[in-house]
Image (cartoon, rainbow, N blue to C red):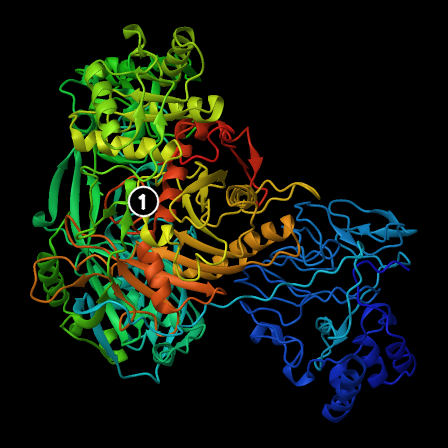
Amino acid sequence: MAHGRGFPRSRACGAAFSGGGSEEKRAERAWMPGEFNGSGDGVNIRRLGLPAWRRLSRRIVRSFGFLAPSPSVGLNAVRSGGWVGGLHRSIRRKCRCHVYRERGTTLGETNCCHLQVGPDLPPGPTVSEYVSPPGYHRQAGKKADCSASTATQVDDTWGQKPSWSTRQRCPSSKADGFGWVVEENTGVEGGEPRGIGQRFDSFGELRSVHMESNSGEIEELPPPPPLPPNAEPIKTDDTKKLSKPKRALMARSGCGKKGQPIQLLTNHFKVSLKAADEFFHHYYVNLKYEDDRPVDGKGIGRKVLDKLQQTYASELANKDFAYDGEKSLFTIGALPQVNNEFTVVLEDFNTGKSSANGGSPGNDSPGNDRKRVRRSYQTKTFKVELNFAAKIPMSAIAQALRGQESENTQEAIRVIDIILRQHSAKQGCLLVRQSFFHNNPSNFVDLGGGVMGCRGFHSSFRATQSGLSLNIDVSTTMIVKPGPVVDFLLANQKVDHPNKIDWAKAKRALKNLRIKTSPANTEYKIVGLSERNCYEQMFTLKQRNGDGEPEGVEVSVYEYFVKNRGIELRYSGDFPCINVGKPKRPTYFPIERSSLVEKSRQKPEERMSVLSDVLKRSNYDSEPMLNSCGISIARGFTQVAGRVLQAPKLKAGNGEDLFARNGRWNFNNKRLIKASSIEKWAVVNFSARCNIRDLVRDIIKCGGMKGIKVEDPFDVIEEDPSMRRAPAARRVDGMIDKMQKKLPGQPKFLLCVLAERKNSDIYGPWKRKCLAEFGIITQCVAPTRVNDQYITNVLLKINAKLGGLNSLLQIETSPSIPLVSKVPTIILGMDVSHGSPGQSDIPSIAAVVSSREWPLVSKYRASVRSQSPKLEMIDGLFKPQGAQEDDGLIRELLVDFYTSTGKRKPDQVIIFRDGVSESQFTQVLNIELDQIIEACKFLDENWSPKFTLIVAQKNHHTKFFVPGSQNNVPPGTVVDNAVCHPRNNDFYMCAHAGMIGTTRPTHYHILHDEIGFSADDLQELVHSLSYVYQRSTTAISVVAPICYAHLAAAQVSQFIKFDEMSETSSSHGGHTSAGSAPVLELPRLHNKVRSSMFFC
């Protein structure tokens, strides 16, 4: 009999449960694992009674080591939170057994399937997202009639490689031990008819397992019991692989003591909470139109809910509520009814959608898609359903402040954040995530280029060591200056006539912006530009002929507007049209009939004044829900104790010291500590304005002063003027052809002079040719003003790219870095770069950099891969390609460390991760770190280095101020108390000097530390790594490995233009981890430059 992946047979258990026909005996057999559950008869466990059940439970425990579920819970216990006694199960909680691994379940019911094999394996309840080993799949959202259904991804608990097959399997009498569940037709299997979704046992019979409830209704058996601790699963490949224990964020072990004490103020305002015994009641909001169509427009929900509160105050028991603008509503205490349905009528309402007959005739565009049009209506009727979802205790906030976070803590803090957002919305603010923008003319500044800056403020509640606090900060955003599209493009490209507009750049600048068209005054979203100009762009106009029959006539956009609509077009005939339609149904407007619609820097003392004013104007004390919660907010800034770490000492060439003052130093009259030589090089010039002779002379002169030997270049290759209007790729190919003809051989280095300082179309194709195809180090420049400082900065980058070093930490040369210099240690920096907002089809670029030549911590190399768009977790750290191959990011970095460090493997791995939010910390700790460990084990299974994992965050709103001073906090300032997390290990550091505006500290979170750093040692290491950035003579705000990872991802992403990737990603490249869409593979770096700091 084929068992698949079932539990092992136990002879003792088989004897103990072999006979008897009583209800108790039958119940025993019903809960037996594996093949012993074989009677197929229905069992009513509830008829046993509690005493018999307890006797049965004791016997099961003696035989199997687990406890069966109690009948007092009821067979539907999973619907109310979970099974008890050995089969405890609840949504969003981890299964206690090692067989099942939950993957993000948020809806529906969950069931712990222990993979028993036999004719009476009971069906499980509906699941929302269940993943199990091959042969026992559950399909999300569907009733599992048997133990098989479509797999979204195969769990690797049993040593199986992931697969994404849509086939279905279940036990049968086939030779391989598995049969297929029929999905669409019926057939014959084992001599018996096969039905859709039915499971067959080893005899080919379709068995039905059921139970009778007390009311006589048929109910399914509960799930099988957990795996006994001494039992071992049977696996087809005879391998053993248990699920890995989940890591938890490490707690703070202590605070640092080194450094000069300094008293600071921070933009956290203390919050007191009195009504800790109350509960927030969460309701799910379902908004529909009168005809039951769902409401999907933004901003509509708040208007509807405000009207609901006015109209049905008595039905809602006059309760105030907080609404998040989407699907969640919160009250303090329960509403009178669990489920509430209301009808709401809004007057003078703009829905953002058009009706079937809305709008004036003759005002539509050719090919107009009515679903994209915004029009106004006098009244609109809505249906509102409020369904109870959950209770959230306010006491969870108090527990968090004591370092005892529960699963309700973040939800409770989220509720009071929503209360603040609603308060600001009622004051007329524009809400952008956690930021609020008042519609006050003084808050808008013209930044040039068709863009305006808008100043608002950010607010959020934070659980800190000193209690609950409200974090308020100045927030800025950029908006497009409203007005004609042509005016925006002229300002954006800094040209004085529409004939000079670069339409390729215009297409990128306009995509996803919103316009209003005249004379209809309707609003659309731009998706692109037409391929031809307005005179030549044709479309099919549907009209009736002389016989009244519909027919299609080809007309141009210009002809349609001028002749059919009678609208004068003065200048846009020669320009592309704006496309607001869909890929298969474009909708065009002339550019002159389109206008864009509306959608910072401060010194420290200015920011403090603004924040105090914001708190006063917000008047949170008047918010009724905050009052009901017993929440009051202090008006003064919170005082914190900081420390200023001493700047690390640096070494230059000839053993000379470099002294950092206020986070800065220079190489005046000093040589680089390890200077390279620039030989066999050439200059390629794409610019018509640069004086190449003077530039080369200054580079040779300045290089000599810094110790860099610079030979005369082979040649200066000038671009043919006739190529300057050609596409960027053609210009690069033309320059490469010309270079190959003129140079005696392949150069080691190329200096590329670009015509534009930023956003040059040449940059990406040029870098790809040099780094991926030819393996040539290249430096691009676009000098507008050449001086000694500019040339020095260029030489610092060139020296690092060619293998040199500009400066070193003195503790590197000693070497005496605590816990790092004595044991081979590799430092990793990890980051992911994403496409611009609105470009959902652009692959994300993951980059990992690693230190090399230990005990140095100043020299790095990079490994870069593409992955699914907007995916923040790096999925290519470990990618086995068989028993001997690993194509992941980590392997080549570990091998490089081994070869560059005298064939020594790193015994310690320090990982700096950038770009993740607090909600993703667990994924970084348990997914990314696992991949890195697996990459190490793949190289040597007996190798077990120690790991320290640190996340750096810049995207936060905590600022520090020196009381009574106009200056920023000094570089080296560190804070690890008061505003830090009440339990977790974190600290803030301002390693750099704030030159303009208020210094933003970096927030470091130590998630995992096996190496055993003390607080002082780790803070000093982080501080030191802010001084090893080879591109600069200043301390930087975040550790150099993270900066390098960001640079590497950004540079390699330019190998292929984003618009090219968007067009080709659907037909090329590998698959994502979810197997849903292909991802365009980036070209790999040439072997000659792979170990270089090409990104510097």
Quadrant hosting residue 554: top left
Dot 1 crowding, Cα within 10 Å, few <14, some 14–19, many 20+: many
426 or 263: nearer the eye?
Answer: 263
In the picture of the structure, the residue carrying the numbered disc 1 is 1029
Judge whether residue 182 can be spotted in this image. yes
Residue displayed at 32% across by 55% down: 1024
From the top left corner, tell me how far across and down residue 193 is, in percent.
Answer: 86, 51
What amino acid does circle 1 point to?
Tyr
From the top left corner, tell me how far across and down residue 828 is, in percent.
Answer: 45, 50
- Residue lying farthest front? 654
389 or 667: nearer the eye?
Answer: 667
As drawn, 127 above or below 521 = below
Left or right: 153, with 533 as reference point: right
Left or right: 678, with 81 as reference point: left
Residue displayed at 69% across by 42% down: 884
Judge whether residue 335 can be spotted in this image. no
1068 or 545: nearer the eye?
Answer: 1068
Residue displayed at 82% across by 56% down: 171
Residue displayed at 44% across by 36% down: 841
* Quadrant including the C terminus: top left
- Residue lying farthest bottom? 51
Quadrant hosting residue 569: top left
Which structural element holds mark 1? loop
Left or right: 378, with 233 as reference point: left
* Quadrant including the N terminus: bottom right
662 or 24: nearer the eye?
Answer: 662
